[in-house]
Structure formats: structure tokens, C-alpha cells
């Protein structure tokens, strides 16, 4: 395995999905966390002026969380077992990204507006995800083992959807069961117990 160095802020944010993939696969990586105060002079040294970035075997800094997550999932055999499965995994991931795009502007709103966004924008997407999961038998999104898509459900629920609703999967039993299953995967459960506690 190459050496992996992941750099982000001391937050879950856009990097936690990548950390969870490394964790689930049991693959070692360096989890570098930049203090917000130290960021201004570092920003110009990053290819797109943003974090996260990944360095592989001490090579160039590669930005953009989704590209990194998908690459790391491929490296860790969590991206789907063939091209078609990979397409299906990425297709599910795109729904999470649509959800995140709905959530970002809503986090600045009052509770009522947050509830409305959850009901009107997020819930229909969760219903679609519930159907996609059911169409694959209801246990995992793609194939018959955990992939990036399933880890994505846990992560985007944990890090983003709970900003709008305490129990976002309440009305979606299959998604709820899968979320629970991912959280109880031994390596993920161990990471959740020990990871730095951050609000974002
Ligand atoms: N397209 C990038 C966006 C990354 C991004 O906006 N990162 C934020 C943190 S979540 C950042 O670096 N903010 C600091 C800044 O822009 O100076 C990705 O998906 O990774």
C-alpha cells in the first residue's frame, strides 16, 4: 500500500467520508488537522486554496473531497467490484451531494425554515434512496457488501442531515437499518468512539 497523508481542518466536514473509508478498510493514513489560525499562510500553498488535500507517497497535493473519496474507495476495494457497480455507487453518492447542497444554505436559517427544507427537499431524496436500497434487496446499496455508498449514508446523515433534523432517517426503515449497520462495523465503531469530537 502507498503512504497516504490527508490534510483537512480539525473537523469532520468534507474530509470525514475519506477518513471513514480508510478506517473501514483498515488502511493506515496520516490524519493531519490544520488549526484555523494556521490556515491563512497555508492557503496559497494548496492547489485550489482549499482543504481537504491528499498526498500519496509524498507526491503532489491533490484537492477535492469527492475525487479523493472515490479514489481512496477504489484503492481500498470499497468502490464497487466492477465498473457497473462503481457507477451505481457513484450514482448514490451524487444523491448525498444533492442533499448536502440543499443543507448548506439552510443551516443559516431559523428552525422553521430548516424544518421546511428537510420536509420539502431532503425527505423526497431520502425516499428515493430508500427505494434504491430496496431495489438492491435492502441490505446495502450496491452488490452484496459495504461500499462507499453505504459509508456515505452514515457520514452524510451524521455530519450534515442532523443539522436540520435530529432523526433524519426516522421514516425510512431500510436506510435507518443500514445506517445502524455501518455505525456498528467494528473498525468504524472504534473510530467513532475515539475520533476527535468536533462540532462541524
Ligand atoms: N471543491 C472542494 C471545496 C473544498 C472547500 O471549500 N473546502 C473548505 C473547507 S470545507 C475550505 O478549504 N475553506 C477554506 C478556504 O476556502 O479558505 C472540495 O470538494 O473539496
Image: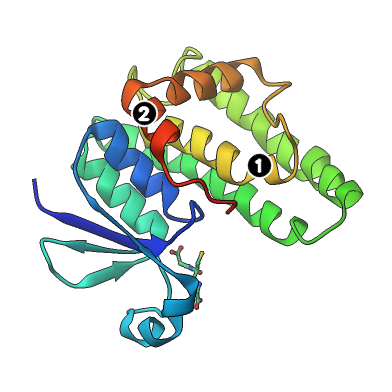
Apparent side of residue 145 relative to residue 127 in the rendered image (left or right): left
Could you say whether the residue bearing mark 1 is in a helix, strand or loop?
helix
129 or 43: which is nearer to us? Answer: 43
Image coordinates for residue 27, horizontal then vertical, percent: 19, 39
Residue shown at 63% from the left, 56% from the top:
101
Above or below: residue 144 compared with residue 142: above
Q: Which mark is residue 161?
A: 1
Residue 178 versus residue 32 in the image, above or below: above
- Look at the numbered disc 1 and say if its residue's Cβ is closer than 8 Å to ligand 1: no
Q: Earlier in the sequence, mark 2 or mark 1?
A: 1
Residue tagged 2: 190
Residue 172 lies, in percent from the top left, at 67, 21
Distance in Å between CA atoms under marks 2 and 1: 22 Å
Decide: few, some or many residues near mark 1? Use Cα within 10 Å; few <14, some 14-19, many ≥20.
many
Residue 11 left/right relative to 29:
right
Give above or below for 144 relative to 192: above
| Mark 2 vs 1: CB contact within 8 A | no
Quarter of the view holding residue 25: top left
Q: Residue at x 55, y 16 (%)?
A: 177
Q: What residue is shown at x 69% (from left), y 53% (from top)?
A: 102
Amino acid at each position: 500500500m502507498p503512504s497516504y497523508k490527508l490534510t483537512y481542518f480539525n473537523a469532520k466536514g468534507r474530509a470525514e467520508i475519506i477518513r471513514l473509508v480508510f478506517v473501514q478498510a483498515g488502511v493506515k493514513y496520516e490524519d493531519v488537522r490544520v488549526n484555523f489560525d494556521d490556515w491563512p499562510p497555508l492557503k496559497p500553498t494548496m492547489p485550489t486554496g482549499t482543504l481537504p488535500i491528499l498526498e500519496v507517497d509524498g507526491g503532489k497535493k491533490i484537492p477535492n473531497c469527492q475525487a479523493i473519496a472515490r479514489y481512496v474507495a477504489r484503492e481500498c476495494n470499497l468502490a464497487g467490484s466492477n465498473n457497473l457497480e462503481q457507477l451505481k455507487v457513484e450514482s448514490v453518492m451524487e444523491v448525498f451531494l444533492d442533499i448536502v447542497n440543499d443543507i448548506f444554505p439552510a443551516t443559516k436559517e431559523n428552525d422553521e425554515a430548516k424544518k421546511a427544507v428537510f420536509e420539502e427537499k431532503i425527505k423526497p431524496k431520502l425516499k428515493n434512496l430508500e427505494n434504491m436500497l430496496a431495489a438492491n434487496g435492502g441490505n446495502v446499496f450496491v452488490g452484496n457488501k459495504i461500499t462507499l455508498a453505504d459509508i456515505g449514508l452514515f457520514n452524510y446523515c451524521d455530519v450534515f442531515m442532523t443539522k436540520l433534523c435530529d432523526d433524519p432517517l426516522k421514516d425510512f426503515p431500510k436506510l435507518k437499518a443500514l445506517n445502524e449497520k455501518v455505525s456498528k462495523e467494528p473498525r468504524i465503531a472504534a473510530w467513532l468512539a475515539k475520533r476527535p469530537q468536533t462540532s462541524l
